[in-house]
Image (spheres, coloured by chain):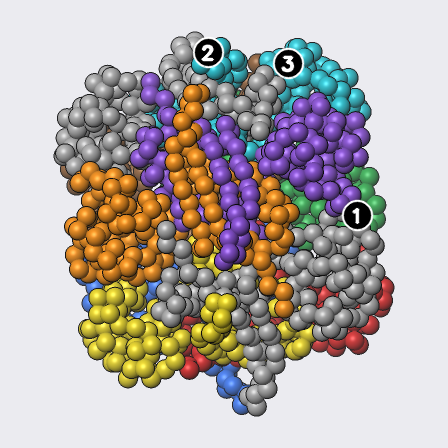
Chain colours: B yellow, C red, D blue, E green, F brown, G orange, H purple, I cyan
Amino acid sequence: MNRNDVTEKIIAAKVSRGLTWEEIARRVGRSKEWTTAACLGQMCFDEAQARVAGDLFGLTDEEQKWLKVVPSKGSLPTPVPTDPLIYRWYEIVNVYGTTIKELIHEEFGDGIMSAIDFSMDISREPDPKGDRVKVVLSGKFLPYKVY
Amino acid sequence: MNRNDVTEKIIAAKVSRGLTWEEIARRVGRSKEWTTAACLGQMCFDEAQARVAGDLFGLTDEEQKWLKVVPSKGSLPTPVPTDPLIYRWYEIVNVYGTTIKELIHEEFGDGIMSAIDFSMDISREPDPKGDRVKVVLSGKFLPYKVY
Amino acid sequence: MNRNDVTEKIIAAKVSRGLTWEEIARRVGRSKEWTTAACLGQMCFDEAQARVAGDLFGLTDEEQKWLKVVPSKGSLPTPVPTDPLIYRWYEIVNVYGTTIKELIHEEFGDGIMSAIDFSMDISREPDPKGDRVKVVLSGKFLPYKVY
Amino acid sequence: MNRNDVTEKIIAAKVSRGLTWEEIARRVGRSKEWTTAACLGQMCFDEAQARVAGDLFGLTDEEQKWLKVVPSKGSLPTPVPTDPLIYRWYEIVNVYGTTIKELIHEEFGDGIMSAIDFSMDISREPDPKGDRVKVVLSGKFLPYKVY
Amino acid sequence: MNRNDVTEKIIAAKVSRGLTWEEIARRVGRSKEWTTAACLGQMCFDEAQARVAGDLFGLTDEEQKWLKVVPSKGSLPTPVPTDPLIYRWYEIVNVYGTTIKELIHEEFGDGIMSAIDFSMDISREPDPKGDRVKVVLSGKFLPYKVY
Amino acid sequence: MNRNDVTEKIIAAKVSRGLTWEEIARRVGRSKEWTTAACLGQMCFDEAQARVAGDLFGLTDEEQKWLKVVPSKGSLPTPVPTDPLIYRWYEIVNVYGTTIKELIHEEFGDGIMSAIDFSMDISREPDPKGDRVKVVLSGKFLPYKVY
Amino acid sequence: MNRNDVTEKIIAAKVSRGLTWEEIARRVGRSKEWTTAACLGQMCFDEAQARVAGDLFGLTDEEQKWLKVVPSKGSLPTPVPTDPLIYRWYEIVNVYGTTIKELIHEEFGDGIMSAIDFSMDISREPDPKGDRVKVVLSGKFLPYKVY
Amino acid sequence: MNRNDVTEKIIAAKVSRGLTWEEIARRVGRSKEWTTAACLGQMCFDEAQARVAGDLFGLTDEEQKWLKVVPSKGSLPTPVPTDPLIYRWYEIVNVYGTTIKELIHEEFGDGIMSAIDFSMDISREPDPKGDRVKVVLSGKFLPYKVY
Amino acid sequence: MNRNDVTEKIIAAKVSRGLTWEEIARRVGRSKEWTTAACLGQMCFDEAQARVAGDLFGLTDEEQKWLKVVPSKGSLPTPVPTDPLIYRWYEIVNVYGTTIKELIHEEFGDGIMSAIDFSMDISREPDPKGDRVKVVLSGKFLPYKVY
Amino acid sequence: MNRNDVTEKIIAAKVSRGLTWEEIARRVGRSKEWTTAACLGQMCFDEAQARVAGDLFGLTDEEQKWLKVVPSKGSLPTPVPTDPLIYRWYEIVNVYGTTIKELIHEEFGDGIMSAIDFSMDISREPDPKGDRVKVVLSGKFLPYKVY
C-alpha cells in the first residue's frame, strides 16, 4: 500500500458516496482549496483531519496513517498537461510567465513569490456576459539572500 | 526583421532608457499586466498604442508595424521553465492542477476557465511577517458545447 | 475503480455486443461525434444519458456514476501520435498550423477559435476518384481581452 | 540562402507592404489556404506562381527559384505548439483523436484520411452569440492495401 | 480485454505451439509481411482470416472479434527504437531521409510515397560474401493537391 | 568553416545552377542514391569525386577538402521527422518494425540487417491506378557473435 | 544586447585578463559563491557592485546597467547536465533525492528547504587519502501554509 | 520479486509500525543519511545490516537476500523532479551548477567531486528568523587522468 | 507470458539460489559476458544452453522456449541511464564520442565498429593505488558500401 | 570568444593543414586518445601543450589561453547520438549496460568504474575475416563509501 492507493480510494469513495469538496472541506475544517489538494495527495493531514477523512471516505487505520505521511507531490502525469482546463493554466504561465516575472521584480526586486507560504481562493464572479472564475493567489515574497 | 527582433529591441531600450513597466503602461493607457505582455511579444498593439511604444522605445516605422501583427505567442524557451520565479508558477499548476480542476468543475460543471477572455492583476499585499505577492486572475467560464 | 476502467469496459462491450457508434448516438440522443467522445472518456454524461449508456454497455450503478464525473481529458498516449490516422491530423496541424493562424487572424484579429464552444461533423463525400472524408469544424471566435 | 530565408523575407515583406493573404491568393490564382501555406514554406510554387510572388514580395531571381523547390515541411518549432490558437488545434486532435479514428473506421473501414490529397476552407460563420470560425476539411479516404 | 491482450496471447501461442510466420501466412492466405503485421496488431482481419487465426492460436470468440476491430497502430514503445535490428531501420531513415526526399521529388514532384497503399517484401539474397536481406517497398506516389 | 557550411553551399548551388541529382551522380560516377547522400553530408568523397563535385558546385579547395572528411551523420533535425514524405518512412518503421524484426529473425536467426554494408535503389513503378515509388534495400545480414 | 552577451563578455574577459573568482569576489565584497553566480548571470548586482565588475571586466555603461537587471536564471543548457562535474550533482539529487526528502520531513514536517533564502560555501578539506571538496548548504526551512 | 518490491514493503512497514529513520539508523549502526538511502533502494546492505533491517521491517529471508544485492540506483521517476522539496535541489544544481564548476576547478584544477566516495550530513540549524536546514556534503576530489 | 517475465524469474532465481554469473557461464559453456547478457534478455540461447539455464533457474518447458526466441533488445529503462555505474559508460560515450569517431576514421576510413560482430571482456587489473576495471572491446570494422 | 570557437578553429585547421591526430599527439607528447579529446574540447591543456597546439593550429595567444581553461564537457548534440559510429557505442551501453553492471558488482562489490581516473586505447586488430577495432578501457574501481 502507498499514498497513491489511498488517494485513488478517496476519489472513488467521493464518487460512490456523492460527496462534494465543499462539504468535505467543512468537515475537515479547512478551506476547500487546501482540503481538496490534501485529499488528492498533495498536502499532509494531521491526526484529527485524518480521522475525519477516514470517516468520510471509509478508510482503514493503516490508510489513515498514510494521510499523515508527507506525500511525494506533483499531480500531473505529463510535463505539459493534456487536460484542457489544466492546460489553460499552463498556457497562462507560458504566455504571461515573463510578464509576471518582470512585474514582480519591478515591485519587489530579485526573489520569488513563494509556492509554499501560499494560499489560493477560487470563486464564482457573476457577470451578465457569462460568469467568470476568479482566482486569488497569495504568496509571500522571498528575496534572494546576498552573502 | 521579425517580431522577436522588435521585442529584444524593446527590452534593451527599456534597460538603457531606465523605463519602468508601470510608466510604460500609463503612457500606453492599459493595465501594466497587459502592456508588459504586449511589449514582451504576447499581445497585439493597435495603431495608437504602437505609436506610443514607438516613441518610448525609439522604434522605426517598420518596427512599429510589427507591433500591430498578431504575434506567435509563448514566452518560455523550455516546456518546464528553469527560472525560479516562473518555475514556482509551473509548480503551482503541477501541485494544485487537479485541485483547481475539481473545484471549478464542482462549481461550474464541465468546461474551462478561459485564458483568452482573461485578465490578471498583480499587487503588493503588505504583511508584518513579510509582504506578499497577490495575484488576481479572472477568466470567463466556458462550458463544453453538447451537440 | 476510475473513469479509465469504465472507458475500457465500454470499448470492450461495444466490441463484444457488436454495437456501432451511430446506433449508440441515436440512443443517447446526441450527435455521433459528441457521443463517441463521451464514451471514450472525453465528455461528461448527464443522468439520463448515463442510464442509456449503462443499459447499452451493461454498466453497474457505480460505473454509471463515473460517467457523470468530469473526466481528465486527453485521448492520446504520446505527444506525437503514432497511429497513422490520428497522425495525419497532427500533420495537418504541423503543416498548416501557421496558415490557419494567419487566416483566422486576418479575418478576426487577435484571438482563438474555441475548442470548447466547438462542434465537429464527420461525413462521407462521394467522389468518382475515391470517396473523401469531409470534416466540418465550428468553433466560436474568442478575442483576447484588452484591459 | 535557403527556403527559410525566403519565407522570412516573404513574411517581412507582407508586413512592410501591408498585403493581405486574400489579396496575395487572388493574385496567385489559388485558394487563400493553399497560397498562405505555400508562402509560409509548406507548398511548392510553379513557374508562373513564383513570378507573381516574386513581384508581390520583391524577390530576386534566385529567391524565386527557391519557391519552386519542394520544401522541407513542418511549420511548428516544438512538438506541442505553444501558440494558443495553434494549440487549440492540437487539443482538438488530443481530445477528439480517438473519436475521429472510431468514426472514420466505422464509415470507411481500415485506412486513413489523406493529408496530401487534402483541401481546407476557413470562413466566418456569423452567429448572434458571437461569430464562429468554420473550417471544412476534405481528404481522400485511403484504404490499407491487403497483399 | 483489448487488442493488446489478444496480440500478446498470439505471440505467446506462437512460441508455445512452435509456429512460423510463413506457415501462419500460408494458412491465412496473405503475404507473410501483411499477416505478421496483422498478428502483431497493426492490420485488421476479415471474418475468415480471424477464424483461421483463431484456430491457429486458440482464440476465443471474443478474442476473434477483436481481430476484426481496426487497431490503434504503432509497434514501437519509444520514439527512437532500442532494439538493434529495428534501430538500423531508424538509422536508414535518419541518414538517408533527405536523400530519399530529394530523389522522390526529383522524379515525381511534390508529394509523398504512401505508407497505406503500400506493400513490402522481405527475402534472402544469397551472396558469397555473406547473404543479404533484400527488402522491396512499393508505395503509391500521392501528389499534393493544389486548390 | 565546417562540413555543414559546405553542404548548404552545395544545396544552394544545385538550386541556382539548376542541376539534377541524376546528372550530378552521372558526373560523379556513382548511383544517384549514394551521390545524393554524399552531397547532403552523409557519405565521404574520394579525391576524384571531390574534384568533380567541386567543379559542379563551384567549391573552393578548402571546401573540397571537407568533402573528403568523414562527416558526422544524421540528416534529420528532430527524433520524429516533421516532413510528411520522411515521416511516412518513420511510420513504416513504427508500424512494421516488429514485423520486419520477426521475419528477418525467422529467416536468418539472431542478428541484424546492416545499414553500413547497404545499398538502396529508388525507381518509378508505372501503374495504371497511379505510378508507384519502388525502393529496393539490400543490407548484409550480420549474425550476433557468440563467444 | 542582453544579459547573456554581458555574461559571455565577462567570462571572456576573465580568461584574457587572468582573473580568479576569489580575487573578483574580494573586490566585489561578497562571498566567492555569490559573486561567481552573479557574474555567470544568476544573481543581480547593485549599483556599487556593478561598477566594480565594470572596472574588472572592462564593461561599458550599458553593459553595467544589465548587471542590475534581474536575470532569467538557469545555467544549464540541458535538463540532464552533460558536464561530468555538474552531472555528479545531478546524480546526488537523483540517488539521494528521496533520502533528503525523508530526513528533512522527519526533522521539520511538511515543507521545503529554500533555494532562495539560501547560501553555499565550497572549500578544500585536506585528507591524507586525497583532498576532498566540502560543500555546506544552508537553506531556511519553509513550512507549507495550511489555510 | 525484485528489489523494488522490497523497498515498497520497507516504506509501508515504516508507516504502519511508526518507525523513524533516526531510530532505524541507530539500529543499523550507520548514519541516518546512508541508512535511509539504503532502505530506499540506493545502497547495499551487508549480512548483519540486512538481518537488522529484516527484523525492523518484518522481511522474509528472500527479501533480506535482496537487500544484499547491489541495486539499480536512481530514486526519481522523472528527469526533472516534480516534488517541490526535491525540485529545490534540482534548481540549486541548475542555478549554481556553473558556479560550483568554476569554483571547484579554480581550487583543484580539472576533475570532479566524487558522488561515490561521498558523504552527506543533514541537520537543523537554529535561527531566530526561522530554523534552517544545514547540509554538509563531502566528496573526494578526483583529477582527470592525463595519459 | 513473455521474455521479460522469464528474465525477471531468472534474476529472482539467481538471488534466491545464490548463484554467480561466473558459475552460470561455466555451466552454459560461454564467456561470462555473453552468458550474462543472454540471461538478462539481450541474447538468444540455443537448445542445449536453454536446457542448462532451465535447470539452473528452475524454468518450465514453456519458459525455456522463450529463451530460444530472439529477444527485443535494450536493457535500459531511460535514454539517459540513471544508475551511476551505467551512467559512467554513457558519460564515456558523451565525452569521448567524437574522439572515438575521429580515431577510428583516421585508422580505418568511413565506416563503423560493429556492435554485432562484437565481443567484450571484463577483468580486474590489480593496481597498488586501487584496483582497476579493465574492459576489452573488440568489434569488426565495417566500411560503408559505395555503390 | 569561447572554448567552442577555439575547438571549431582547431578542427578546421586540422582539415586545411592536413594534419593527423597521431602526428598531433606525438607533438603534444600524450596518447592520441587524450590528445584528440583535448583538441575536441573535452580535456584541459597545460602551458606547454597549449603552446604546441597553438603552433600546430595557428592559434592566437588568447585562443591558447582558452585551451588551459577547464572546458564544459560533453561532445554530443543529442541525448541519443545520431551518427552511426557513435550510436553503436550507445547501443553497446544499452544492450550490455546491465551485463556490465552485474559483472563489475560480482567482481568488486558496490561501486563504479571511474570515467575520470580512466584511460582508453584504440588500435587495429588484424583479422583474416576483416580487421577489427580493439578498444581497451581502464578505469579505477571506486567503492561506495559507507558512513
Say which chain tag 3 marks. I
Q: Nearer the viewer, residue E52 or H17?
A: H17
The residue that disc 2 covers is I127
State how far apart marks 3 and 2 are (Cα): 23 Å
The residue type indicated by label 1 comes to: Glu
Tally the numbered discs: 3
* Disc ID at residue E63: 1
**Residue appearing at x 33%, y 84% in the figure:** B29
The residue type indicated by label 2 comes to: Asp
State how far apart marks 1 and 3 are (Cα): 45 Å
Q: Are marks 3 and 2 on the same chain?
A: yes
Does the image show residue D106?
A: no
Q: Nearer the viewer, residue D19 or I37?
A: I37
Looking at the rendered structure, the secondary structure element under dot 3 is helix
Q: Nearer the viewer, residue D102 or C93?
A: C93
* Disc ID at residue F144: none
Q: Mark 1 or mark 3: which is in front?
A: 3
Q: Position of residue E45 (x, y in %)?
A: 71, 48
Q: Position of residue B133 (x, y in %)?
A: 47, 70
Q: Mark 2 or mark 1: which is in front?
A: 2
The residue that disc 3 covers is I22
The residue type indicated by label 3 comes to: Glu
